[in-house]
Image (tube, coloured by chain):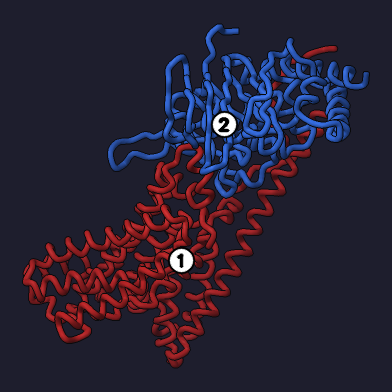
Chain colours: A blue, B red
Amino acid sequence: MTAEPILEVQHITKLFGSVIALSDVSAKVYAGEVTCLLGDNGAGKSTLIKILSGVHQQTEGDYYFEGEKVKFNSPREALERGIATVYQDLSLIPLMPIWRNFFLGLEPVKGWGPFKRFDIDFAKRTVRQELLKMGIDIRDPGQAVGTMSGGERQSIAIARAVYFGAKVLILDEPTAALGVKQAGVVLKYIVQAKARGLGVIFITHNPHHAYAVGDRFIILKRGRTLGIWSKDEITREDMIRAMSGADELEALSHELDELARRDAAKKQLELAQAEAEVADELEEGEKLFDE
Amino acid sequence: MTVKTASPPTRDERVAELGAFRSMLRRPEVGAVLGALVVWFFFAAITPEHWIGLGGVARIIDSSATLGIMAIAVALLMIGGEFDLSAGVMTGTAGLIAGLLSTQAGMNFWAAAGIALVFALTVGYINGLMVVKTGLPSFIVTLATFFILRGANVGVTKMLTDQVRVSGIDKVSGFALARTIFNTEITIFGEKFWTAFIWWIVLAIVATWILQRTQWGNWIFATGGDANAARNVGVPAMKVKIALFMTTAGAAWLVGIMNDVRLRSAVASQGIGQEFVYIIAAVIGGCLLTGGYGSAIGAAIGALIFGMARVGIVFVGWPTDWFFSFLGVMLLVAVLVNNYTRKRAEAMTTAMAKARAESQEEDEA
């Protein structure tokens, strides 16, 4: 664990007209860790990450990146500093081929002056290589992204952020729209990104997904910080209790069972070390939950 | 528990490589090419004596060239997700400004054309700025521009000349050179061609190169596909849209000047109604009305289909009153063909994606 946080916000307040979206929120994100941002709908998760990624600017409070006070006026500025955000909609254009999507906004160019052009061969080659690293073999980089599965799209978005040298990777509900199996795949990529030394901010309203991969947990409620814990300070149940009422617990336990069952099956398969860790966590969680 | 390291998945022999034929079918302009062939053979069968040969080619090209230039610019804008209903009337405005300034104010034709260009680009800029700043549909914003310019074209022309046309443009200084460069008659193998067609071909190539081979092209597709997502990854979507509106206005200026030097005069009603023809040509060329998909070459071919119909109807001797009805039918047919081929191509791609996903699941199980 690094002593200094790579990204830190202090006493952030954000007003939209008379609506207080965030009130006095502070948070720290460390490199090589997964920081989970939890909270129900309307808790202010999206507003906070939009401030972190430069889409919005805070009304009050300070934002530090790599120890330096910063103010981003656009997502591009944040991106240039190494803060990459993978949005729920993934910021992928369905009608466009994979290789065009992968380099969108940061196209490699070759040539000079008016003949400066998009280095297409490089783009196609690189996309194949980078996705192969995540275990996805795309035969045809010219395939439209709209024809791919949810997990595949998510992996393209994450691979893109990692490839472009993100230091902080913000993932906005990456598992929300996915099935259990696909969600497991995405959790694996999160651990991979962490292992590569990135500071990962993982936004979710699913405490099981969060507890499986998280090192640090920030729970927001109605625009305020409900609490900040590191993993050894909080159990899964406490976290769930902090987040939600008893009604939701039943539904959640259902989902957890499903995930754990899938995970048990997965163990017999080829698993990277990182993935095995995730699985262990989930199994442990299930036991605790059954008690 | 054994932990194996993940090895890259091997290729699945059940999924065929995407063949050259299929990737050709996947191109947006394939419908336009088929449509053009159908229309060409149709008229070639009915009136071969006029149609086949260089004479027919010259007539078709002449009828399509300026329309094609506009269709290319409009296609770029449509791929970027917007419409410009003022594009047609802008050809008239640009031509009138150049004509009025040179004949009434005694300006050199080049200076007058330069001012017309600045004016056209400014209107394009304002169109774009209004669309991106207000978030209003470009359909409404440019419809307003269309009416403003349409009124001003007649109003200003009447005020300055007491007529609805500007004549005698050929008597001003700089006209001869402008005519040589923008639109003059040349003879190729005994047939007369207007050089606007060279501009048309060059612009189709340049626009295609920009779309397919440059960073800007990627940005245009992305802006039309999903402007929000594009902005999130750092594409200056607003700038792209404004630049595209300026491009259609710039193309309208070019066509306005071409008309000036060809006809030696300009009329106040020039270009009205043409805006839909440009959009239709772009759609026949494979552009989606919703943006994010299309082709510049396709739009150029879409314009060619129009040109063929316009000339063909005269050759065959059908009453020209029916021209627009004929166009309507052709539009419908072309769009249906387009739609069919695109769906076929997409179905094939999707089937491949599914086959792969299934094979991966089997691999893992």
Does residue A232 sit above or below A65 in this rendering?
Answer: above
Q: Contact, CB < 8 Å: mark 1 with mark 2? A: no
Q: Position of residue A90 (x, y in %)?
A: 60, 38
Q: Position of residue A12 (x, y in %)?
A: 53, 27
Nearer to us of marks 1 and 2 is: 2
Q: Secondary structure at mark 1?
A: helix
In this picture, residue B252 sits left or right of residue B22: left
Camera-side residue of B302 and B220? B220
Name which residue type carries label 1.
Answer: Phe
Name the disc covering residue B139, or none: 1
Q: Position of residue A48 (x, y in %)?
A: 57, 31
Residue linked to disc 2 = A49
Question: Farthest residue in the front direction?
Answer: A18
Name which residue type carries label 2.
Answer: Ile
Q: Residue at x 63, y 28 (%)?
A: A224
**Residue B127 sits in quarter:** bottom left
Does residue A91 sit above or below B81 in this rendering?
Answer: above
Camera-side residue of A282 and A238? A238
Does residue B111 sit above or below A151 in this rendering?
Answer: below
Q: Residue at x 29, y 70 (%)?
A: B91
Camera-side residue of A220 and B160? A220
